[in-house]
Image (cartoon, helix red, strand yellow):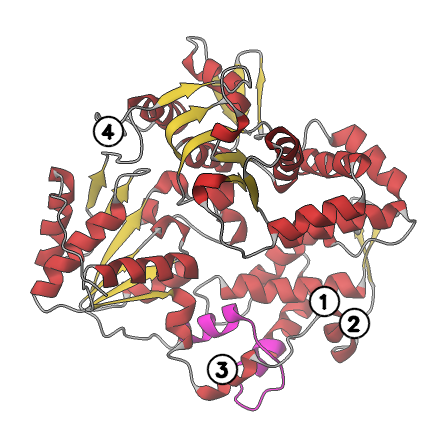
């Protein structure tokens, strides 16, 4: 490999980060707004530290990011930096007996029912008789362990059980039931940490085991990319290190709270340096991002567009723009992404390939579940198991489809099954789950907002379907949705088509605007 030279001169704010890093006196956090060159900054920092003979560790939230970082660091001859995910780092440092457990079958709810002889549990709630099935109880036990693995706690407690119970039911605190769940969860965990134990383990189990060993990392400094997506478990490891830690990320792009991520950037009592100069887009897109940052988050700092880059914010119409001019369509949900997939497959008529970037497995489960209900079969999909008939699903959507985000998505899935056969939907699903590489110039990517994070395209259309309401001059929107919108509007390099959120932008620009947290 031909080693590249770092030719780009660092900006003044990047230089401050380099100077801070090379002193290696204290850990610090680097707040990098969208498109502000955080990777370039880390390359500059690592290059300077390599010249000082220092060894570095780059940690990321997912494997794709770690692989991409490894390639970039190698291109610049930065062989003093090891790139890894948190899970990979743990895996390399766990004993063989624990690695062997990864290949064993993990416990399924039905296994737990049989092993621990679970039965249906009846209880009173709000004066009514309720029931927990044996399988639901088993699922709650597994989720209790999942929540335990997200924490720094030394042992499974009733608090973990209560969180899992609350997720599946509306039950209040119940010591007897929580004791039962905790007791079984502890027995499973004891088997996990027993070299002679029988059960297989998940990746989260060995990560938790490794953290409990209080490991020391043999590096001079650690760079934690996308720190806002990390959690307290990882923070616990990093706080104990002799190595200085550079926490890098953007708190406004913390969008994985639903799977346990906690924005540690906000709570870290460390000196903060900022990257505010975006290299991705010009002033027009930066203005939209700043509108969201200021009005939705109260952020007073300004994301600066690149003066030399021409960006445009407008509305998409086939009379002004050809569908083939789009490079990406970003949707709120998987269901909406499929809706746009079918629509633009017709528009493009073979001019471009279409690439779906969605949660293909979950989408397949829901589509399959709806078709199963239509055939008078019990759905295998977890999200649809509470429905005993197709009509019950339809009635539910008619009542709640306009007010609940999840139900709104379900309505879109249902509408698609009314328009297309299972064979056609299965063809689209195959596209969403394919690993084939595509030519970016000749491909239209239709992605969810979650999948779009960290990516960029020339011309981006924002689809309809984001979860907010505007009633009587008041915007009702959740904290999670605010962050998701910020991620979405900052993906475009050249043209941003804001069709799906024009009413939101108009509201934020109005004088009498009010915002309420949903």
Q: CA distance from mark 1 to mark 2?
A: 8 Å
Can the viewer see residue 120? yes
Contact, CB < 8 Å: mark 1 with mark 2? yes
Residue corresponding to mark 1 = 138
Residue shown at 7%/65% (left/top)? 52
Distance from Cα at disc 1 to Cα at disc 4: 54 Å
Tags 1 and 3 touching, CB below 8 Å: no
Cβ atoms under marks 2 and 4 closer than 8 Å? no
Question: Picture coordinates of residue 83 (x, y %)?
Answer: 31, 65
* Pick the front one: 271 or 294: 294
| Mark 1 vs 4, N-terminal side | 1
Residue 275 on the magenta segment: no
> Which numbered marker is on residue 118?
2
Q: Residues within 10 Å of mark 4 (few under 14, many from 20)?
A: some
Q: Considering only vertical position in the picture, is 457 above or below 75?
A: above
Q: CA distance from mark 2 to mark 3?
A: 30 Å
* Residue 259 falls left or right of residue 264: right
Q: Position of residue 446 (x, y in %)?
A: 55, 39
Q: CA separation, marks 3 and 4?
A: 48 Å
Which residue ends up furthest to the top in the rendered image?
511
Nearer to the camera, 475 or 92: 92
| Image location (x, y in percent) of residue 62 | 43, 59
What residue range appears in magenta?
Answer: 188-211
Question: Tag 2's secondary structure?
Answer: loop
Q: Which residue corresponds to mark 3?
A: 99
1 and 4 marks in contact (CB < 8 Å): no
Quick check: marks 3 and 4 in contact, CB under 8 Å?
A: no
Q: Is residue 209 a member of the stretch shown in magenta?
A: yes
Callout 3: helix, strand or loop?
Answer: helix
Question: Which residue corresponds to mark 4?
Answer: 306
């Amino acid at each position: 490999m031909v080693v590249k030279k770092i030719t780009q001169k660092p900006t003044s704010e990047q230089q401050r980060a380099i100077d801070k890093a090379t002193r290696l006196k204290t850990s610090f956090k680097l707040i990098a707004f969208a498109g502000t060159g955080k990777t370039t900054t880390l390359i500059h920092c690592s290059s300077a530290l390599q010249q000082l003979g220092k060894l570095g560790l780059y940690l990321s939230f997912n494997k794709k990011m770690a692989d991409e970082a490894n390639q970039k660091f190698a291109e610049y001859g930065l062989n003093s930096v090891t790139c890894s995910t948190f899970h990979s780092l743990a895996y390399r440092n766990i004993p063989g007996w624990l690695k062997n457990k990864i290949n064993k079958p993990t416990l399924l709810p039905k296994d737990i029912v049989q092993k621990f002889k679970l039965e249906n549990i009846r209880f009173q709630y709000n004066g009514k008789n309720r029931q927990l099935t044996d399988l639901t109880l088993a699922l709650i036990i597994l989720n209790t362990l999942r929540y335990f693995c997200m924490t720094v706690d030394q042992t499974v407690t009733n608090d973990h059980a209560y969180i899992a119970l609350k997720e599946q039911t509306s039950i209040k605190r119940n010591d007897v039931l929580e004791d039962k769940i905790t007791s079984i969860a502890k027995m499973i965990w004891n088997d996990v940490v027993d070299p002679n134990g029988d059960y297989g383990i998940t990746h989260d189990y060995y990560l938790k085991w490794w953290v409990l060993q209080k490991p020391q990392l043999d590096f001079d400094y650690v760079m934690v990319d996308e720190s806002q997506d990390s959690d307290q478990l990882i923070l616990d490891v990093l706080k104990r290190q002799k190595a200085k830690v550079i926490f890098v990320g953007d708190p406004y792009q913390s969008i994985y709270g639903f799977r346990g991520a906690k924005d540690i950037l906000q709570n870290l009592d460390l000196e903060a340096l900022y990257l505010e100069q975006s290299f991705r887009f010009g002033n027009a897109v930066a203005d939209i991002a700043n509108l969201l940052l200021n009005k939705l988050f109260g952020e007073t700092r300004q994301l600066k567009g690149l003066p030399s880059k021409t960006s445009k914010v407008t509305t998409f119409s086939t009379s002004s723009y050809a569908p083939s001019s789009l490079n990406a369509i970003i949707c709120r949900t998987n269901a909406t992404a499929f809706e746009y997939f079918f629509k633009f497959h017709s528009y493009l008529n073979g001019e471009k390939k279409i690439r779906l970037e969605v949660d293909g497995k979950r989408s397949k489960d829901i589509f399959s579940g709806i078709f199963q209900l239509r055939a008078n079969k019990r759905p295998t999909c977890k999200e649809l198991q509470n429905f005993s008939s197709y009509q019950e699903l339809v009635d539910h959507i008619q009542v709640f489809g306009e007010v609940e985000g999840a139900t709104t998505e379900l309505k879109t899935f249902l509408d698609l099954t009314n328009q297309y056969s299972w064979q056609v939907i299965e063809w689209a699903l195959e596209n969403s789950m394919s690993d084939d590489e595509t030519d970016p110039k000749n491909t239209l990517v239709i992605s969810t907002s979650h999948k779009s994070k960290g990516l960029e395209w020339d011309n981006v259309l924002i689809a309809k379907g984001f979860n907010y309401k505007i009633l009587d001059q008041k915007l009702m929107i959740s904290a999670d949705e605010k962050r998701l919108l910020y991620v979405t509007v900052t993906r475009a390099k050249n043209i941003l088509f804001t069709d799906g959120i024009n009413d939101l932008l108009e509201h934020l620009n109005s004088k009498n605007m009010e915002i309420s947290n949903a």
